[in-house]
Amino acid sequence: MQILTDTEQSNAKSYMLQLMEEVFYKCRSLTGEGAYDTLKMIQREIGIQINEVESGKKVFDWTIPEEWNIKDAYVLNSNGKKVIDFNDNNLHILNYSSPINERVKFGDLKNHLYTLPDHPEWIPYKTSYYQKNWGFCLSQNQYDSIFTDEEEEFHVVIDTTLENGVLRYGELYIPGKVDQEILISTYFCHPSMGNDNLSGVVLATFLGKLLKEKQNFYSYRIIFVPETIGAITWLYENRDSVNNIKHGFVLTCVGDKGDLTLKKTRSGNAEVDKVVEYVLSESGNDYNIIDFFPGGSDERQFSSPGFDLPVCSLMRSMYWTFPEYHTSADNLEFMEEGKIGETAEYYLRVFHILENNKFYRNLKPYGEPQLGKRGLYRMIGANKDQSVEEFFNEMAMLWILNYSDNKHTLLDITLKSEIPFNQLLAAANALMEKGLIIET
Ligand code: ZN
């Protein structure tokens, strides 16, 4: 089963990497201008609605935080030389740092510095959203070259504001034939990093663009939220309508070159689990399957017991498991080497199966209906020239007729018969055309 040709997949990758590049260096966070600029880019591409929720509002057990904005941040050494500069890389700032303008001895400053000794060239990504703090992240090498004297005095400037404002999230609703929805959720709050999670942002944008152009069976709802607080806010604002969600996906870490990974839904046996597993197994490529656990990304909000929505996550290398995770090495080159175009293809295959995974009812269930007189059966048993394909097409029809009992979906029949889904779909369509079965 292939939906996008290899060329289309490679064009899709170029498109997504271009979007990523455009906003890569914005200093995103839960709130603020960098996040807003990113939402505006998505809006330009697919026309999302941008919603605002005011600071201080209670959303379940949480409160919308103050809006954070940053103008500049740097550290000067005792000679007045800029030794750490936010303008070099926005990962240098502890995200959501409070403002400060003070002289601080290295002995005190070091409690506010974060490095990664195991990867001395990389800058770590750190946040302090819900506890007021300030700090800088830098490579171990940079640290070692700057800080040698405990008594040296540094001038620390963090020009940020934390004030009442809004938290924003984006939403695109694409109505389908039925009200039941497929939810695609991704988060845009991380600053300059690719796999986590501009990859999710640009893939959701790309999928939105394609889905908008198609007639879909399901309605699709694509949401772009800041992680955790944004998903909780969205759930709060939509708490009375989430029951329309039939299948869901959290898009995170979809752009590296690792094998595909399915993190299953909380129940582990939702329709979407079976569909993704089938797509992965049918591909012939290696893949990983992980049971749900209540850590990781926003699947844990959608799967909290009050909602318990069938939301899975189809990723490449899972967060935490790749060394570049939450560091400056999760950069555009890392994405250039990755396979985001192929990930798009997998999502489209999954949507294709979900959209066509119907139950059928046999309208002539007493014995086999006579297929020959309807032009559906060619000389079975008497024709030595029958091709293997014809044989399988006929077998496909027999499987469909037998299991059009309102209890087996097309994927169930696929798994029983080991005939590819698309071949069974073609057989089911032929049988429907002749009035032998109906979709239920
Ligand atoms: Zn992350």
Image: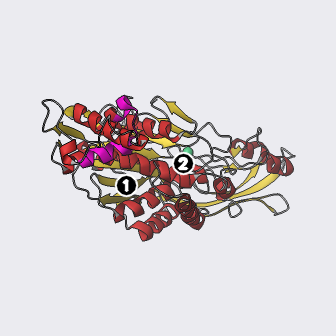
Front residue of 405 and 112: 405
The answer to whether residue 241 is left or right of residue 208 is left
Front residue of 168 and 80: 168
Q: Is residue 423 magenta?
A: yes
Is residue 426 in view? Answer: yes
Judge whether 130 appears above or below 414 on screen: below
Front residue of 425 and 62: 425
Q: Is residue 437 magenta?
A: no
Cα–Cα span, label 1 and label 2? 16 Å
Residue 341, x across and y down, in percent: 55, 55
Q: For mark 2, what is the residue? A: 254
Mark 1 Cα-neighbour bin, 10 Å: few <14, some 14–19, many ≥20:
many
Residue found at x 82% / y 48%: 141
Between disc 1 and disc 2, whose residue precedes?
1
Residue 281, x across and y down, in percent: 49, 36
Residue 421, x across and y down, in percent: 37, 41
Say what amino acid the circle numbered 2 marks: Val
Please tell me in which quarter of the rendered image ligand 1 is found. top right
The answer to whether residue 275 is left or right of residue 149 is left
Q: Quadrant of residue 219?
A: bottom left
Question: Which disc number belongs to residue 369?
Answer: none
Q: Which residues are magenta?
A: 414-430
